[in-house]
Image (cartoon, rainbow, N blue to C red):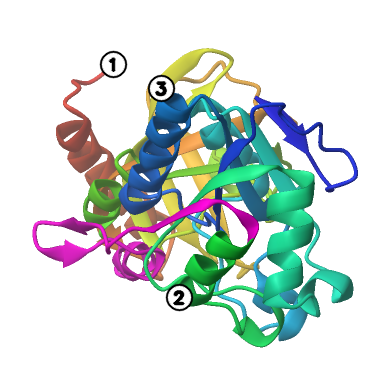
Amino acid sequence: MLHFKSIDEVSKAPAGSAVTIGKFDALHLGHQNLLNELKSAASSRGLSSVVVTFDRHPLNFLKPGKAPQPIIGASQKLAHLTDSQIDVLLTLEFDDALANLSAEDFVRKVLVEALGAKFVIVGHGFRFGANGEGDCALLAELGEKFGFEFKALDQFKLDGEVVSTTRVREFLDRGDVVGASKLLGRAHITTGNVEHGLKIGRTIGFPTANIARDCEGYLPVDGVYAGWMHVDGEKMPTAISIGINETFQAVPRLAEAFVLDRKDLDLYDKVVDLEYVGFVRPAAKFNGVEDLVASINNDIAKIRVLLGIGAGN
């Protein structure tokens, strides 16, 4: 996959391109369906498949602090799009110039002149251009003007319900990582660097890996989860805790991970993936070390069941 970060970098395909546009801030089943339609259209027409996306959610620029948190981060999105086997990714910087580009100028400069679009496909309700003035009806008109085919997909549904980034976020906000994974078509994952913390866990026999707060992958509601840690080619059963650790000393919200049955790990400064499998319990404040240790042992027993593993395996 070729990855360009401005239209000035783009090498236009001689035969032209099939293009889709979007934030792709979850790459859930609906997004995946759109990408599959894109690749199919490109293949049947002898075109390059091109995804146009942005370096941030537009609201991060237009209304700082008001943008919803993405389900996946920038490097996760890049990895998923690479795996999707599209030909070209164009990641545009969402800045003042782009925000003020009219809908027609966006189509002309980006889709037609830079990418040589011959086919354009978007999801239901797509809007574009300054103040969101462009919609699917306008794209259809501009297709006739500039000579490209246009297709708008219907909403993608699973079990009769629309699949959307908002719904994925709602599942995660109530700890339903299983429900979220169904909409994503894969397990939800948090990716981040392991950093030094207060090291309280090791003093009570449960050393945890603190994941840096600039991690990627939306953190579900505070609580304990069964999951897997992926690092250095290994997949290890893991207790994942999301919260502020208020039993000892409250800290800014973070993800911590305790790998079961391993005392030999040195994970500092390594990038790890935390894969969520199931919800164990909500976050809680304990009266002391004994209560906390008893709860952790109970959590671990439940995690073994959820992961289908025995003691020491």
Which amino acid lies under the numbered mark 3 shown in the image of this protein?
A: Met
Measured from the top left, where is residue 227 in percent x and y?
A: 35, 37
Locate the N terminus and report the quarter of the image it occupies: top right
Measured from the top left, where is residue 26 in percent x and y?
A: 46, 54
Which amino acid lies under the numbered mark 1 shown in the image of this protein?
A: Gly
Q: Quadrant of residue 41?
A: top left
User: From where the camera sits, is residue 66 visible?
Assistant: no
What residue sits right under mark 3 in the picture?
236
> Which mark is in front, 3 or 1?
3
What residue sits right under mark 1 in the picture?
312
Q: Is residue 167 magenta?
A: yes
Residue 139 numbered tag: none
Residue at 23 percent of width and 21 percent of height: 311
Measured from the top left, where is residue 96 in percent x and y?
A: 87, 76
3D distance between C-alphas at marks 1 and 2: 60 Å
Measured from the top left, where is residue 175 in percent x and y?
A: 30, 62
Q: Is residue 28 magenta?
A: no
Crowdedness of circle 2 by 10 Å Cα count: few (<14), some, many (20+)? few
Q: Is residue 129 above or below residue 80?
A: below
User: From where the camera sits, is residue 146 visible?
Assistant: yes
Identify the magenta region: 146-175
What residue sits right under mark 2 in the picture?
137
Which amino acid lies under the numbered mark 2 shown in the image of this protein?
A: Ala
Q: Secondary structure at mark 3?
A: strand
Mark 3 touching mark 1, by CB under 8 A?
no
**Left or right position of 215 against 160:** right
Residue at 38 percent of width and 31 percent of height: 40
Residue at 52 percent of width and 35 percent of height: 80
3D distance between C-alphas at marks 3 and 1: 11 Å
Mark 3 or mark 1, earlier in chain: 3
Q: Looking at the image, which is closer to me, 254 or 263?
A: 254
